[in-house]
Amino acid sequence: MKDWFAGCVAERYDESTADMPVEPVVDFLAGLAGDGAALELAIGTGRIALPLAARGVAVAGIDLSPDMVAELRKKPGGGEIPVAIGDYATTRVDGTFSLSYIVFNSINNQTTQEGQVATFENAAAHLEPGGCFVAEVGVPSRGPLRVFDLSDTHVGVDEYDADTQRLVSHHFNLIDGRWERLSMPFRSVSPAELDLMARIAGMRLRERWSGWQREPFTSESRKHVSVWEKA
C-alpha cells in the first residue's frame, strides 16, 4: 500500500477538509463507544480522533503516513494519542476496543479486495465481543466520470471503471498561480460486498444510514455510514 499523503498533501489536508462536518461524526462515534476505547484506522491528522478524545473517549490509531501523523502531533492533545505507523489492514495495537472506525472513504485506499477484507479482519480482531466497526464509504459511481468538486482553486474528477471497480480521483489544485494534478487510485466497493467482508471477519450488519445524523439510506444515497457488530 502506497503512502499518497506525504509532504504537501499532509500539510494541506486539514485545509482541504475544513468544510467537512465533525461534530455529528463525533456524536455518532461517542455514542457507540460508550465507556470503552476507540481505534481509528487511517487516523491521519486527527480530524475526528482529537475531538472524540476531547469527549472523554480513549482513542488510539493506525496510519500509514508518518507525515499525516506529524500533523496530528502538532495539535493540542495530539501527542497524547497512541498511533502505530503501518498499513491499517495488518498493523496491530495493544488492547481491545468497544469501537473501531474508518471514515471518509479510507477503506477505498485499499486497492484490492484482499486488502479490504484484511481491513475488516483487523478491525474485528481489535474489538471486544459486541464491539462495533463503523465505516463511512461512498456508493459506487453510476457513470465513468463524475465531477465532485469545482471551485476557483480546485477541480475534482472521479474516473470509474465498473468492470474492475477501480476508481481514480483526479485533483487539480491551483498552487502559486499554477495548476497541479494529483491522481489517487481507489477500489470502489458496494454496501453488499462490505457486508460480506464483515461476515468473513465474524461481524454482522447492525445499522446503515446515509449520513452521520442517521438519515435513511436509500437507492439515491451517495454514501453510507454502516455499523457492523462483532459476534
Image (spheres, rainbow, N blue to C red):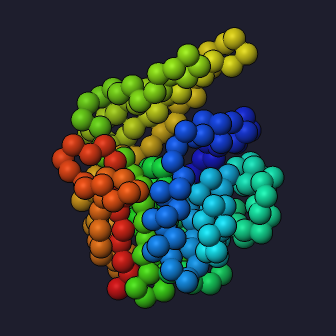
Total tally of numbered discs in the picture = 0
Left or right: where 37 falls relative to 138:
right
The image shows residue 86 at horizontal and vertical percentages of 65, 61
Residue shown at 55%/16% (left/top)?
Answer: 152
Pick the residue in front: 220 or 123: 220
The image shows residue 51 at horizontal and vertical percentages of 63, 61
Residue shown at 77%/54% (left/top)?
Answer: 75
Pick the residue in front: 175 or 210: 210
Q: Which quadrant of the figure has residue 146? A: top left
Left or right: where 147 falls relative to 179:
left
> Is residue 64 visible in this depiction of the protein?
no
Quadrant containing the C terminus is bottom left
Residue shown at 18%/47% (left/top)?
Answer: 219
Left or right: where 216 falls relative to 15:
left
The image shows residue 17 at horizontal and vertical percentages of 58, 40
* 177 over 28 or under it: above or below: above
Q: Which quadrant of the figure has residue 228? A: bottom left
The image shows residue 207 at horizontal and vertical percentages of 29, 68
* 38 over 66 or under it: above or below: below
* 173 over 82 or under it: above or below: above
Toward the left, the furthest residue is 219
Toward the top, the furthest residue is 177
Left or right: where 95 falls relative to 31:
right
> Is residue 139 visible in this depiction of the protein?
yes
Residue shown at 69%/42% (left/top)?
Answer: 10
